[in-house]
Image (cartoon, rainbow, N blue to C red):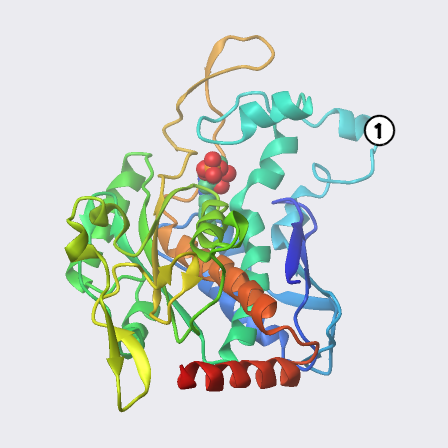
Amino acid sequence: MLRYLTGGESHGRSLTAILEGIPAGLNLSSKDVDQELRRRQRGYGRGQRMKIEKDKAQFLSGVRLEKTLGTPITLMIENLDWQNWQDVMASENKGADSQNIPLLTYPRPGHADLAGAIKYDFDDLRNVLERASARETAARVAVGAICKKFLAQFEIRIYSRVIQIGKIKDITQWQPVEARYELIENSPLRCLDKAKEKEMIALIDLAKKEGDSLGGVFEVAVTNLPIGLGSYIQWDLKLDARLAYAIMSIQAIVGVEIGSGFTAAEEFGSRVQDEIFYDQSGSKFYRKTNNAGGIEGGMSNGEPIILKAAMKPISSLARALSSVDMVSKKAVKAMKQRADICVVAAASIIGEAVVAFELARAMREKFGGDSLREVKRNYSSYLDYVRKR
Ligand SMILES: Cc1cc2nc3c(=O)[nH]c(=O)nc-3n(C[C@H](O)[C@H](O)[C@H](O)COP(=O)(O)O)c2cc1C
């Protein structure tokens, strides 16, 4: 019902995405998307590329006079860096000039280079790395921005923050999220604990000095979700599985934890399950804890969704690692590309975006409708029903 595809190479002319299934009648301006694209470009530890790109989205279809039409929304983000790569990335073969473009043959550990070149039978690793690059996530953030706009119609909000860089951890609780979010949005690493953030920044500076890189952990929280999104009836409908898939699909993400996750595995059951209570005055079921991270049996249970994602350190290092020339098979140092040092802050924004898509998809499945007004009618009738249970 809701689906999307992205296209585009890192140094190609542009990134594109087609998002289908957003109902008609949603107010949508390119500014809504640009604001999210800007958030993705920030964060202490990013490299030179983000100084070149000033990402902006243009709608090519699906939006008229700042309202969605219910038709596929096509959007485009131009790569400003393309100016510097026109010959290398040209779609036309310009004869001798094209033949003289040097081949990249030193695969980088931790990248798609080696497996991609063998799988697709390429001599030039550029054919792999251009698409495997996380530049693609700008298109996903754009799609997520539209999904967020849709979710906001139902007061559903998505937040994120960085809780770990290397071994330095911010262990602060941030509930209620809304009250403290400005602090996170205005901080260089999207971190709540300022003392820890300073340590994290110092660690990133050290990594940079040593020609190294860093990973970390970010957290995503979603508030005000209705009970019953996703389903227990089939494996591929389970909301926890779908969110984990979405997050794992982000470049360099190596682990996902829902709720208390790996800590829950160490505890007795009596300390992990979130006991059920009923609020007579508010006529609603509630929990005093949220170890489940808002999902039970593959469905949202009405509590905030909380998930964490672990990101490995950036693969391309200034201090290049050992590799092998694909042609001569001799030992070489992996090629160096202009690289970020640490991008956990940017990854948290991408995390918000892919979560937004997955939740918007689950909302579309549950509440149907062709126009936003129809979705809202269906939604409010469901909420009336839930209140009576
Ligand atoms: C926002 C973002 C920026 C990234 N920037 C770089 C980079 O500058 N250099 C690099 O080697 N990897 C970078 N990565 C990670 C690679 O894209 C990723 O490790 C690689 O494509 C291999 O995919 P995998 O780690 O999922 O196996 C970045 C990832 C994200 C999410």
| Residue 125 position (above or below residue 247) | above
Residue at x-position 54% and y-position 14%:
325
Q: Is residue 81 left or right of residue 35?
A: right
Q: Residue at x 64, y 62 (%)?
A: 2
Query: Residue 127's x, y, as percent?
Result: 66, 32
Q: In which image quadrant can residue 259 be found?
A: bottom left
Give the percent coordinates (x, y) of residue 166.
Answer: 25, 43
Figure quadrant of residue 130: top right
Question: Would residue 319 be seen by someone viewing this image from the given angle?
Answer: yes
Q: How many marks?
A: 1
Residue type, label 1: Gly
In front here: 100 or 378? 378
Q: Quadrant of the C terminus?
A: bottom left
Q: Is residue 91 left or right of residue 239?
A: right
Q: Quarter of the image containing the N terminus?
A: bottom right
- In this orientation, which residue lies closer to the viewer: 178 or 10? 178
User: Residue drawn at (37%, 61%), measured in percent from left and top?
Assistant: 295
| Picture coordinates of residue 346, whole percent (x, y) | 42, 55
Q: To which residue does mark 1 refer?
A: 95
